[in-house]
Amino acid sequence: MKKLVLVVIPTMENAYHSLQDFVAINPPIGLASVAATAEKAGHEVSIIDGDAEQLTLDQTIEKIIEKKPDYVGSTIMTATMDITQIFYEKLKAKLPNITVIVGGPHVSALPEQTLRDSQNIDISVIGEGDETIVDILGALDRNADLKNVAGIAYRNNGQITITGTRLPIKDLSVLPLPAFHLLNYTLYRSYGWNKWVNGYRKPLGIIFTGRGCIGKCNFCAAHNVFGKGIRFFSMQQIKDQLDYLVNKWGVRVLYFQDDTFTANRKMVNDICDYIIEKGYDKRLEIMVSSRADTVHLPTLKKMRQASVRWICFGVESGSQEILDRMNKHITIAQIKKAYALSREAGLFIAGNFMLGNLGETRETAMDTIRLACELDEEYASFAIAIPLPGTELYQYCLDNNIPLPAWNDFGSVNTPPIPLNESLSAEELMKLRDIAVNRFFKRPLYFLKLLTRMRAFSIISDFVKMYFAIRAEKAAKRL
């Protein structure tokens, strides 16, 4: 039987440097989902997580060689494309006959360019990979032509061929559960600030209740893989995942990683009822993401009863004009109401804010900073807009001849941002981000609120570590 190894190429140190201890290490549910359908079709599959196991590129390659696979696959994000090229160049120097299959948002947006960028990648998967991987492996096992496999780009006698479109899987209930048994959940952890409540970050489990998003934001690349709209898994699939993660791995931190967990109110209530019925509310701390226009007080209260502690909102901007340019389709009034309802339900709030989107000026950026401080969430992150391939922002850059950097510079904390507006340079954007972080986190009343409501030692320890980590990053940039 031929073997498939799915690999998480280690990229955290390259992306986060001295800040990597504060970020989450998520189980690769996308790879586990692909592994599940491949296993169901009779293939032997394993997963090597280079980030979770803290491996170097060379160590990861040695682990792959030990498996003696016929095929290897991975997910590519835009910021990891360059290191992926290096990785597969090294791998093919040792295993020249191995077939390399890649997927993910970057590949789905640029399937042909991915193959042109790396001569060591053989097949690009466009969109969801669950069914595509089965068709690819079946064709390769039979030495059949790949032209009949929908939703891929591949090398064909020195030329790149893109096959017919593969539509998103309409009925997700036909899919097997992700191959959780191929992952070691003791290695996965949540964000550093998650431990401010109960003092722990792992084991971390992730569940998706559906695929896709109801939003159409100009900066989001999720639709490259999942298409437009949102589809849901069955309630039984979600129950089975909860049972496995809690009872098999003793998961203590759970993240429902849907872009909008609250999009399906009935499903949310059913999930909460099941968690309470099984007693999992006594064993879990849960985090979810939401949109401001989808929250409902009775549902939020039910979520809190079911051990949801954190709700994360994509606020993005304090300027209604900028929100409209982003295609967020929410208002600042809705954001404030969503925060008020979440607080009434007893939830901690994390807010995501973005600087530098289309039309941004210093004044609108300061509006965002003021709104973040006014909302006074328990945690806030401030990002600078990134024109990822497949997004409206990326197309805007192409249409307006805005220079784009190497793939490695899309999203690294150690590289300058990409200015999208003449009014704000890269240097000014970084200064605005520093202003946002300093104004939000250095408020005495904010710090006092955290110390009185959460675990004081964890908070003080993290703030001290983060202070010195940021200083180290700035010192490294000056060298």
Image (tube, helix red, strand yellow):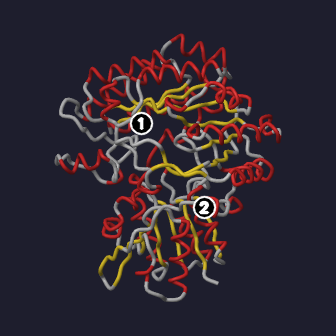
Instruction: Give the total number of marks visible in the rendering.
Output: 2
Residue at 81% of width from left, 50% of height from top? 247
Q: Amino acid at mark 1?
A: Glu
Graded by Cα atoms within 10 Å as few (under 14), some (14 to 19) or many (20 or more), the crowding at tag 1 reads some
Residue at 58% of width from left, 37% of height from top? 262
Q: Which mark is residue 473?
A: 1
Q: Position of residue 128 (x, y in %)?
A: 50, 62
39 lies left or right of 231: right
Q: Which mark is residue 358?
A: none
Q: Are marks 1 and 2 in contact (CB under 8 Å)?
A: no
Kindly identify which residue carries mark 2: 33
17 lies left or right of 138: left
Q: Position of residue 51 (x, y in %)?
A: 56, 54
Quadrant placement of the C terminus: top left
Q: Secondary structure at mark 2?
A: helix
Q: Position of residue 345 (x, y in %)?
A: 65, 22
Furthest toward the top, the residue is 445
151 lies left or right of 236: left
Q: Position of residue 291 (x, y in %)?
A: 50, 33
